[in-house]
Image (cartoon, rainbow, N blue to C red):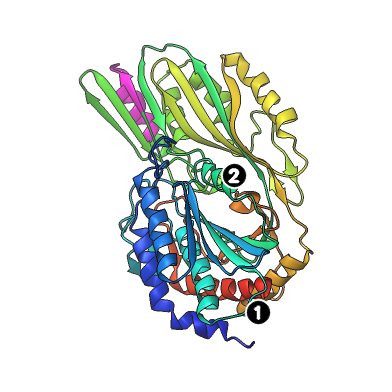
Amino acid sequence: MSIDFEKEVLKRKDEIIKDLQELIKINSELTTFDPSRVGAPFGEGNKEALDWMLALGKKDGFKTVNVDGYAGHIEYGDAKEFVGMIGHLDVVPAGNDWTYPAYGAEIHDGKMYGRGTEDDKGPTIAAYYALKILKELGVKLSKRVKLILGIDEESGWRCVRHYFSKYPESPVSGFIPDADFPLIYAEKGITRTVLKSSFIDERIIKLEGGFRDNMVPDFAEAVLVYNASYQQLFDKYVKENNLDATFKEENNQINIRVKGISAHGSLPELGKNAIDLLFDILKALKIENNLTLLADKYLTHDNYGKKLGVNYHDEEMGDLTVNFGVLKYDGKDALIYLNLRYPNNVNYDKDVLPKINNEIKEFNFVATVEHHQQLLYKDPNSEMIQKLMNVYKKHTNDVDAKPLSIGGGTFARAMPNVVAFGPHFLDKPSYIHQKNEFIIIEDLIKATIIYTESLYELAK
């Protein structure tokens, strides 16, 4: 069967844009997780996004399933073997200082702005339309195709764990539309490493920074008991270091707030960590305690774990990275979330965690692991990868392209026989997990073309 995939996608361009705009307007940031909240364990916004997507599938004549409000799927065909995709509809917090509304889905200069446009609602819509086009063309396939929808990818993957407990089948092939083109064959291991301690510092009422460990924090603040010396020390340090920070005195308290620049937690070097900057200010104010000393000696201004002695470089997969993502201290209990990502040849449980604990015990802190995604590695020469690469090359003329290794983590770890595949083109800017996230409309359409033909090649 001869199909002009580009023509078929372009015929539906306006429809694709309209549906993505509707989905972006749903704020699906995780609020709280409550398994007793029937049908909405991840909150109403995440429920609304899942319901909206399943309703779209049902309207277009697909079989749809909602798995207890945790996840769902849209399915085409009846064959035993299937080709699988997983997209996610949850988003990281929007953060601050957007040029256009984070949930406005406004289009300016050929770009749609909004949280989730590239990560991962835009790619999920592209994958959905790839499936829809094959159905509308009546293409005969030898395999089922199933688009699984998660709503807890950014927070803990409880959605897919629950889904696969109810639908444990594995695909024969597939892809995850939540990374980069040309294709991802390896992903670093990822941990949420939590550092805890308890101590009293009567000078501090509160320290807080960051939204999620997998985002470089773009804000941090300190609420301090009033001290007449702080203003002059603050002004001098901020001026000398050209920081974007404010100092407010009110009700015998001082509020200090510092701004940074957010970035994805897998690439902390691309951001400006506001928590690091806050600790620099506290040091300038001559505030010392176990927390500030720990941060200065082992954590701040170090994206590669050199201060902790856990730095490592792998020729194929790159560096171990550490993102100081979240800080909380209420005058008594201190909590730090590190997003630590490691390449091949690193044994996190045997080598890294014990090393961290050995260092931080000096300041009475203890490190534990709250979440761990094991490293992923697929043979870049496999038949499936070659099929996907060939489709990518056909529609981009990027004939010398090679599959990639990344520090990000995708749902490719959630089921076997799949790899991460697009939608981001490496020669274009990306603002995922940052303010002003957008997707270039032309790239969204190009990704849809690639996904449509790729599904056909895998399932025909």
Vertical comparison of 31 with 19: above or below: above
x, y percentage for residue 210? 43, 37
x, y percentage for residue 70? 47, 46
Is 358 on the left-hand or right-hand side of 337? right
Q: Residues within 10 Å of mark 2 (few under 14, many from 20)?
A: few
Q: Nearer the viewer, residue 225 or 29?
A: 29
Vertical comparison of 299 with 450: above or below: above
What is the three-letter code of the residue carrying label 1? Lys
User: Which callout, 1 or 2, points at the residue further toward the start of the chain?
Assistant: 2
Q: Nearer the viewer, residue 39 or 78?
A: 78
Q: Residue furthest left?
A: 251
Instruction: Determine which residue is flagged by label 1.
Output: 394
Vertical comparison of 27 with 331: above or below: below
Q: Nearer the viewer, residue 81 or 334?
A: 81
Q: Residues within 10 Å of mark 1 (few under 14, many from 20)?
A: few
Q: Nearer the viewer, residue 454 or 366?
A: 454
Instruction: Determine which residue is flagged by label 2.
Output: 165
x, y percentage for residue 348? 70, 33
**Camera sees residue 350:** yes
Q: Quadrant of the C terminus?
A: bottom right
Q: Is 229 included in the stretch rendered in magenta?
A: yes
Q: Is 94 included in the stretch rendered in magenta?
A: no
Q: Residue at x 50, y 28 (%)?
A: 336
Is 113 on the left-hand or right-hand side of 6? left
**Which segment did they paint magenta?**
222-238
> From mark 1 to mark 2, how far is it between C-alphas?
38 Å
What is the three-letter code of the residue carrying label 2? Ser
Q: Secondary structure at mark 2?
A: helix
Mark 1 vs mark 2: in front? 2
Q: Residue at x 51, y 17 (%)?
A: 197
Q: Quadrant of the N terminus?
A: bottom right
